[in-house]
Amino acid sequence: MSYEFDDDTGFETLAIRAGHERTAEAEHAEAIFPTSSYVFASAAEAAARFSGEQPGNIYSRFTNPTVRTFEKRLAALEGAERCLATSSGMAAITATFLGILKSGDHIVSSSSIFGVTNVLMENFLKKLNIEVSYVDLTDNASWENAIQDNTRILFLETPSNPLGDIADIRALADLAHNNNALLVVDNALCTPALQQPIKFGADIVIHSATKFIDGQGRCVGGAVLGTEAIVGTDVFAFLRTAGPTMSPFNAWVFLKGLETLKLRMDAHSVNALKIAKWLQQQPNVVKVHYCGLESHLQYRLAQKQQSGFGGIVSFEMKDKAAAWKVIDATRMISITGNLGDTRSTITHPASTTHGRLTPELQIAAGIREGLIRLSVGLEDIEDIKADLSLGFAAL
């Protein structure tokens, strides 16, 4: 059995209960189905399932009850018709591009994207004769000027990783649609708890569930959300064939993450704003990047699109040596490339997450040698400050 939710159902309720269809065992919590395949009542039923004439489970590469529960719940939170869960955030991006695009197509992408996404575009999509043009995330005119007759996708992260720049989703959605293109938005840093890009006209939303959706650094996964016509047909066809599939166990862990998502994202936002304001007062800090600061150039736009500002704060030291000293002197904060954890994490983007970018692309993305990315966790705020103070004292 399952309960039907209406349009007035609250976010927190959907995050806890949406998508769960109880089995004959009448379990209260969602079950994990660690099975590779399913048994059919007859050869005719098997044929009908494989052909798509009859709905139901076929093979866990593309149909699994636990994964389906996660997909339905996340779709409810994002306001999407369809969600596909994938093995990682990068698998979600790859499935989107290869499910929709063909040789000769063109992408207009923000230059302020996760470094590995750029590597995917430069090293692999271009092998397939899919061209990419990079533009300033916040300059709408540059987006318009980059569009070609063969442009099929406009791709961006907002807020961007790691600088927290904000794109005008509605304006870029209108631009994409006026040119027969799709707007694809990576929403990993906000999650649907703080931002729902589909409400502003985005066609596809991408998630790295590894980050805030899990929230405790336990599993790797991703998701693609959008319409049944695009995600449920084109992207699903790629996932069914190529198999970048989320495991049932990981889907179950992410379901538990969704239950506390709103609480955690609100708490991350509160802590991050306090840390950002505190960092502004530190004499060795050259600049602080956080869209929740009133001095941020897109502060008003962030207020319009988001219900909170998220947990990622980046700040600049004078050079790489100073940045590394600060990072190395911390004792509590974890030095790791991941983000979105209840535990605060710190990294040097220029040599890690964005280290494979060319120097030109690093400059375009604003990844300077003195930049430090801090994913502000849920520890006591004074303990986070004290640990960062060890870094500043090391200078």
Image: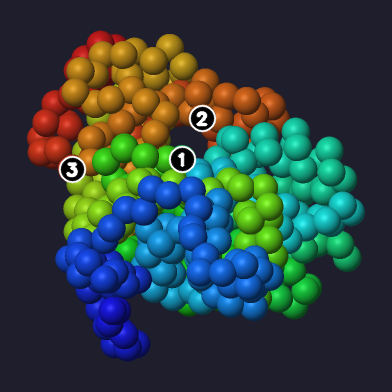
Q: Position of 368 compared to 146: left or right?
A: left
Mark 3 vs mark 1, CA separation in Å: 19 Å
Mark 2 vs mark 3, CA separation in Å: 23 Å
What secondary structure is marked by label 2?
loop
Q: Name the residue nearer the viewer: 388 or 40.
A: 40
**Residue under label 3:** 378
Q: Amino acid at mark 1?
A: Pro
* Visible residue check, residue 7: yes
Mark 1 vs mark 2, CA separation in Å: 10 Å
Q: Position of 74 compared to 139: left or right?
A: left
Q: At which x and y percent is residue 29?
A: 20, 61
Q: Nearer the viewer, mark 1 or mark 2?
A: 2
Q: At which x and y percent is residue 223?
A: 49, 56
Q: Is the C terminus in the top left, top right, bottom left or bottom right quadrant?
A: top left
Residue 162 marker: 1
Q: Name the residue nearer the viewer: 99 or 78.
A: 99
**Residue under label 2:** 353
Q: Name the residue nearer the viewer: 257 or 172.
A: 257
